[in-house]
Amino acid sequence: MSKPGILRAHRAEVVRDLKRTRLPLGVIGYRYRATRQVLSVFMKRAGIERPLRPSRHQVDSCPVCRGLLRVSKVPHNEFLTGRTIRGRLRPSVRYERHRRHIRKLKQKGLVHQKFGCLNSKKLEKAYAIYFPEKLPVYEIGMRAGLKNFHATIRQHRKWGWEVPPPLFVYRVKTRSRTANTSMGHRRRESKKEAPR
């Protein structure tokens, strides 16, 4: 236990140690025969702010973060699943807990906020076809094994995903003309076959 008035006698030294050093409160308290609770109360009353410890995790020296940054340079990287991201890392760091590294990179703004959020392999396959190829959305969904890929795109846009419009554009006038001509041709044939 600390003796009464022990911190008052060494006030200048205690304040210096608390402000200039990053030693734990237990070490400083052992030096002046005071507990951590007494030191914390002393700091609050005196308004002392201790220097922050530097973060142990550094992005430049972390192999997992460097691998994730390399994967994030791929176009449309926010549409990759966590399994695919882990598979693209180097074998030495492939089985590390990459989720917390992704969270730290997002906090620093180094990767997209949706990076690693996709969980479906079918959606990943559908988006891999959606961006480069000029195909209807329905056909892309059928290739990937999705029933309503168009509704999924609308939902992702609502949730904040940056999904561009499809490359394939329907020609409404052409489709209507071809449909009308085909229907008229069928009616003519039915009228010709009626007298028989």
Image: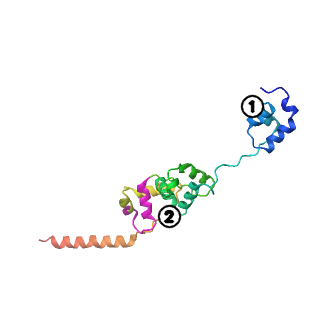
Question: In this image, 128 relative to 42: left or right?
Answer: left
Instruction: Tell me the residue at 88%/32% (across/down).
Output: 9
Residue neighbourhood size for the residue with mark 1, other residues' Cα within 10 Å, grouped as few (<14), some (14–19), many (≥20) = few
Question: In this image, 56 relative to 51: left or right?
Answer: left
Instruction: Tell me the residue at 42%/60% (across/down).
Output: 126
Would you name the residue on which mark 2 appears?
164
Compared with 65, 9 (above or below) is: above
Location of residue 83 in the rendering, given as x and y in whole percent from the top left corner: 46, 53
Label 2: element kind: loop
Label 1: element kind: helix
Compared with 68, 184 (above or below) is: below
Write the start and end of the magenta stretch as one range. 120-139
**Is residue 128 highlighted in magenta?**
yes
- Quadrant containing the N terminus is top right
Instruction: Tell me the residue at 64%/53% (across/down).
Output: 58
Location of residue 111 in the rendering, given as x and y in whole percent from the top left corner: 58, 58
Q: Nearer the viewer, mark 1 or mark 2?
A: 1
Which numbered tag is attached to residue 126? none
What residue type is disc 1 on?
Answer: Gln
Calculate the distance from the C-alpha at mark 1 to the C-alpha at mark 2: 57 Å
Mark 1 or mark 2: which comes first in sequence?
1
Give the overall secondary structure of the magenta segment.
helix
What residue type is disc 2 on?
Answer: Pro
In front of the other: 108 or 54: 54
Would you name the residue on which mark 1 appears?
37
Q: Residue furthest left?
A: 196
Location of residue 19 in the rendering, given as x and y in whole percent from the top left corner: 80, 43
- Quadrant containing the C terminus is bottom left
**Is residue 160 highlighted in magenta?**
no
Q: How is the image coloured?
A: rainbow
In front of the other: 40 or 120: 40
Location of residue 15 in the rendering, given as x and y in whole percent from the top left corner: 83, 39
